């Protein structure tokens, strides 16, 4: 009986080791793929931004729309590559949190500012009171907030800007709110889109789950 138990444990350990090796190889492959994708995307985005600034010469209205489409979609593809790389690291057990003291208000302001510059959109940020500081991985919080804002804008068809701690008289359909609480902080992103059906709510944390027909994106 003892020998059988040892044999079973040995087989399980061997299988775990093999699974980890496969996951690590996949993470390496995704990392290489992500890098290979992001390099040309950066060039495409840089070139489109130069065109949008009309540095090479003036553009007509149709050309401006085309350039904006290129810029927006290259940014979306870059975020998708980052999502895939992060998921691969988590699956491979290579994921590590880099905790630091983060000013959530300042971080959210930078996110909104960057999105406004990239997309020319308008989302309002409401963060009253003293700046909320938390121990967090700033890059991951940034990624989460960015994804939520982009999803909210896509759902409600709104544009992004910044109220910098004040709520406008006619609020945008998308509102980012940050509230300090006793021992943590609450970040909420609200939109006035169509929402989710009960069936979609059941699948919200499934990989690649999406309310869109083509189920594009990596999901939450």
Image: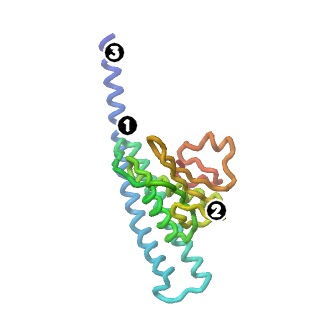
- Whether residue 198 sits left or right of residue 104 in the image: it is right
Residue at image point 31% right, 24% down: 10
3D distance between C-alphas at marks 2 and 3: 67 Å
- First reached walking from the N terminus: tag 2 or tag 1: 1
- Whether residue 212 sits left or right of residue 53 in the image: it is right
Which of the 4 image quadrants contains residue 214? bottom right
Residue 41 on image: x %, y %: 44, 68
Q: Which residue is mark 2?
A: 171
Residue at image point 35% right, 32% down: 16
Q: Which residue is mark 1?
A: 19
3D distance between C-alphas at marks 2 and 1: 50 Å
Q: Which mark is residue 4?
A: 3
Vertical comparison of 5 with 45: above or below: above
* Callout 2 crowding tier (Cα within 10 Å): few <14, some 14–19, many ≥20: few
Question: Considering the numbered disc 1 on the image, is that residue within a helix, a strand or a loop?
Answer: helix
Q: Are marks 2 and 1 in contact (CB under 8 Å)?
A: no
* Callout 3 crowding tier (Cα within 10 Å): few <14, some 14–19, many ≥20: few
- The residue furthest bottom is 57
Q: Are marks 2 and 3 in contact (CB under 8 Å)?
A: no
- First reached walking from the N terminus: tag 2 or tag 3: 3
3D distance between C-alphas at marks 1 and 3: 22 Å
* Callout 1 crowding tier (Cα within 10 Å): few <14, some 14–19, many ≥20: few
Residue 127 on image: x %, y %: 51, 56
Picture quarter with the N terminus: top left
């Amino acid at each position: 009986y003892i020998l059988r138990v040892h044999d079973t444990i040995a087989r399980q350990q061997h299988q775990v080791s093999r699974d980890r090796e496969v996951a690590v190889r996949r993470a390496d492959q995704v990392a290489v793929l992500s890098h290979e994708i992001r390099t040309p995307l950066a060039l495409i985005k840089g070139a489109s931004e130069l065109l949008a600034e009309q540095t090479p010469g003036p553009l007509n209205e149709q050309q401006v729309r085309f350039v904006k489409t290129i810029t927006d979609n290259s940014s979306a593809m870059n975020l998708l590559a980052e999502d895939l790389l992060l998921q691969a690291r988590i699956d491979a057990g290579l994921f590590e949190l880099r905790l630091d003291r983060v000013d959530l208000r300042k971080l959210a302001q930078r996110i909104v500012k960057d999105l406004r510059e990239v997309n020319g959109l308008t989302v309002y940020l409401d963060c009253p009171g003293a700046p909320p500081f938390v121990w967090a991985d700033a890059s991951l919080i940034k990624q989460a907030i960015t994804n939520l804002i982009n999803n909210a804008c896509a759902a409600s068809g709104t544009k992004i800007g910044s109220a910098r701690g004040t709520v406008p008289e006619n609020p945008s359909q998308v509102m980012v709110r940050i509230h300090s609480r006793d021992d943590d902080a609450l970040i909420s992103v609200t939109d006035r889109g169509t929402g989710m059906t009960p069936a979609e709510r059941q699948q919200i944390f499934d990989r690649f789950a999406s309310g869109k027909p083509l189920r594009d994106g990596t999901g939450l």
